[in-house]
Image (cartoon, rainbow, N blue to C red):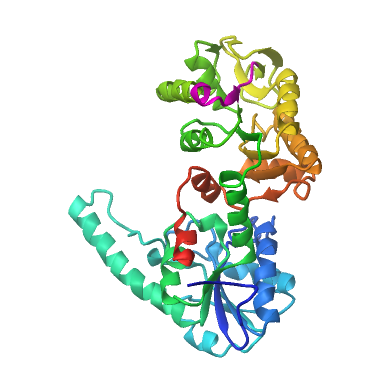
Amino acid sequence: MQKYIDSYDFAGKKAIVRVDFNVPLNENFEITDDTRIRRAIPTLKKVLEKGGSLIIMSHLGRPKKVDPKFSLKHIVARVSECLGVPVQFAEDCQKADAQAAALKPGEVLLLENLRFYAEEEGKPRGLAEDATDEEKKAAKKVVKESQKEFVKKLASYADCYINDAFGTAHRAHGSTALIAAYFPDDKMFGYLMEGEIKAIDNVLKNAGHPFTAIIGGAKVSSKLAVLENMLERVDNLVIGGGMSYTFIKAQGGNIGNSLHEDDLMPQALEILAKAKEKGVKVFLPTMSVVADAFSNDANAKVVPTAEIPEGWEGMDVAAENLAEWKDVILGSKTVLWNGPVGVFEMPNFAKGTLQIAEDLAEATAKGAYTLVGGGDSVAAVTKMGYADKVSYVSTGGGAMLEALEGKDLPGIAAVRE
């Protein structure tokens, strides 16, 4: 049975907490952005304040073996600083029995990178490139069997389990989906997960109308399921970024050298037809900022999106469309934004994406519920200083996408069961 962190009695108990401390490190192993650590601190402090001790587990990067550059020892000092207490470190997350047992109330132990073990992901490693299907099947069976022992060991360290790692909630890994079964009456979400779940419910189940979804990014293929799910819920659908050119070409437009996916043009037309059938108003960029090379310093001009010359490619949405989209955003009660509407990493073609961030902040101030998810969208509101001026900024890229597709996320389902 799922419990709740605010009402759970942590006094004298050890809590094992799955967090997402997959933070970026520079060449000197210094943290360049500690947002993910800071977002988990309220949950961790709650356990300590209520008389419990902490065993923290996370992954860092995507190592396929033990690799010192991906060691969580690099973040111990920052976690200690954020928590305000010394953090002990277990160099092997499967041999931390003594350290976990010795923890006293108020003490903290950080386990080494979970992904140093194949059992965390449940996938075999080191297979020969020419391995047969039977060999692959046998290797997978071995890993799955040893995964049970891996998870059982982690669970043995604690009295209760908290999942506060939304960024990995879509992964059916040992520490996110399987360990919860060892705590049938003592499992719960942390504050971050509770916030993410509430934010998703606010747009998928409890949205106020008019409801507008702004879906951007490079490729239709990565957002197709999101677009289809949103058609069941929204009043307005704004499609921007590289993915918009597939829609323009599908309708007979000339898009020059713009990014597009020919094989997805039939699906693009189906989405437009379905939107019309459901009365959903679709907004595509009718005017684009184009460039003669994929470079910040390229020559640029504004042309109709359906008349982009050969040798030129769409890089950003033009001011005319941004003005129209702003009216749509400010006229909405709920706004979801996932994905940039231009080449955000290039300053000369980031204007559209930054304008969307500004519009969402204004809409929020006027009472709209605004949810921002996806790396570049989050980067845009952060860069503009608007992260605290929208209703919610999601910490999960892939997890947010799968939630918006309408999928049940394993990390959430495991705690709710």
Quarter holding the C terminus? bottom left
Q: Is residue 24 left or right of residue 187?
A: right
Q: Residue at x 51, y 82 (%)?
A: 159
User: How many numbered dots are placed on residues in this image?
Assistant: 0
Q: Is residue 282 magenta?
A: yes
In depth, the one of 338 and 1 nearer the eye is: 1
Image location of residue 222, percent across then percent down: 48, 36
**Residue located 77% across and 43% down the image:** 367
Residue at 54%, 62% (x, y): give it. Answer: 70
Residue 180, quarter of picture = bottom left
Q: Which sits in the foreground, 146 or 234? A: 234
Name the side, left or right, on which 252 lies relative to 29.
left
Q: Does 1 lie within the magenta span?
A: no
Q: Is residue 69 above or below residue 296?
A: below
Which stretch did the figure color magenta? 275-286
Eyeballing the image, is 7 above or below 220? below
Residue 48, horizontal then vertical, whole percent: 67, 80
Q: From the viewer's perspective, is residue 291 above or below residue 157?
A: above
- On the question of residue 348 being in view, the answer is no
Q: Inspect this view and state whether residue 368 appears.
A: yes
Query: Looking at the picture, how far across and down is residue 49, in whole percent?
Result: 70, 80
Q: Quadrant of residue 304?
A: top right
Would you place residue 365 above or below residue 149 in this image?
above
Residue 98, given in percent of the width and then of the height, sits at 50, 88
Apparent side of residue 124 relative to residue 361 in the rendered image (left or right): left
